[in-house]
Image: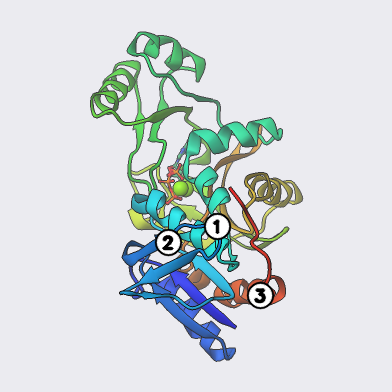
Amino acid sequence: MKMAILSCDGSLYSCRRLREVAEQRGHFIHIIDPLSCYMNINPASPAVHYCGEPLEYVDAVIPRIGTSITFYGTAVLRQFEMCGSYPLNDSAAITRARDKLRSLQLLARAGINMPVTGFASSPDDTQDLIAMVGGAPLVVKLVEGSQGIGVVLAETRQAAESVIDAFRGLNAHILVQEFIKEAQGRDIRCLVIGNKVVAAIERQAKEGDFRSNLHRGGKAHPVNITDQEREIAVKAASTLGLDIAGVDILRAHRGPLVMEVNASPGLEGIEASTGLNIAGMMIDWIEQHALPGQRPKTAG
Ligand SMILES: Nc1ncnc2c1ncn2[C@@H]1O[C@H](COP(=O)(O)OP(=O)(O)OP(=O)(O)O)[C@@H](O)[C@H]1O
Ligand SMILES: [Mg+2]
Ligand SMILES: [Mg+2]
């Protein structure tokens, strides 16, 4: 098959692994920087252009679009979809997942448990917003953050007000969320492919931090998850329409809570801690689902 990875940095671990596995299987795979793509949008012969040339048809595209370029990256992916390429996560699902507010609303509507979360625009509502999530300590997070950047723990009501005001002053969209203290700086990352959790790790924040992200110095180890956790992870991914997803779960006293769903989960931490060939499973999925010359998968 002819495949493309959409990524600004082909030297990243996940890109390297996907390329390595695809080539071992005899596929032709090309890493394409979405920012260097440009598009001819027309009903008769849509095309993606790259470095002065229209790109030839590719059977499947693996989007590895960073959060800083979601808008342009998903537009490029949509264009590949219009050309009939199979996307491993379609552009509409990625757009949904990138917005934490929108995805939590969709997950709540599907009956999936989560930390109590509030969102407001007017500074007049800050007091009520804080009360709504149970008061301090609480978590404030950027609607479009990742790698733990823009996730802040406010220990007191005064701290919460200052952090909320500071983010507002920067015109940033933020969520205010109940702090799940009993998680003790740990979360579970479930890697979902299709309707299966294919790997799960527990991540523990480094001393003095509450964020378990590996990019913030957290440590990971494989973990056994319960049937309930498995079920909620799969349901969260399918609610957002993602074929592959990293679903982050907090173990709370009241049961597992979905904190967020990532559309482009990193492979390094999870492959290193579990020894599993996740890149291989992603290529398996494409081999099973991307039919050469298929019709476009999504329109929106
Ligand atoms: N409500 C909460 N209660 C307790 N801990 C939390 C809460 N929200 C976030 N955390 C901690 O902060 C970390 C980062 O939060 P979150 O996953 O929402 O951010 P992110 O920047 O999208 O991370 P990722 O790199 O996984 O995409 C979580 O992994 C978790 O350890
Ligand atoms: Mg995230
Ligand atoms: Mg996370």
Residue 151: give x, y in percent of width and height. Answer: 36, 38
Relative to 295, 68 lies left or right:
left
**Tags 1 and 2 touching, CB below 8 Å:** no
**Viewer-side label of 2, 3:** 2
Q: Under tag 2, what secondary structure?
A: strand
Residue at (55%, 74%) from the top-left corner? Answer: 279
Q: Under tag 1, what secondary structure?
A: loop
Residue 17: give x, y in percent of width and height. Answer: 47, 78
Residue at mark 3 to residue at mark 1: CA–CA distance: 17 Å
> Closer to the N terminus: mark 2 or mark 3?
2
**Residue 264 visible in this rendered orientation of the protein:** no
Relative to 268, 189 lies left or right:
right
Q: Please state which amino acid type lies under the numbered disc 2.
A: Asn
Q: Which mark is residue 293?
A: 3
Residue at (42%, 61%) from the top-left corner? Answer: 40
Q: Quadrant of the N terminus?
A: bottom right
Relative to 205, 244 lies left or right:
right
Location of residue 189 by image quarter = bottom right
Residue at mark 1 to residue at mark 2: CA–CA distance: 10 Å
Q: Please state which amino acid type lies under the numbered disc 3.
A: Gly
Q: Which residue is mark 1?
A: 43
Q: Nearer the viewer, residue 17 or 155?
A: 17
Q: Which residue is mark 2?
A: 40
Coloring basis for residues: rainbow
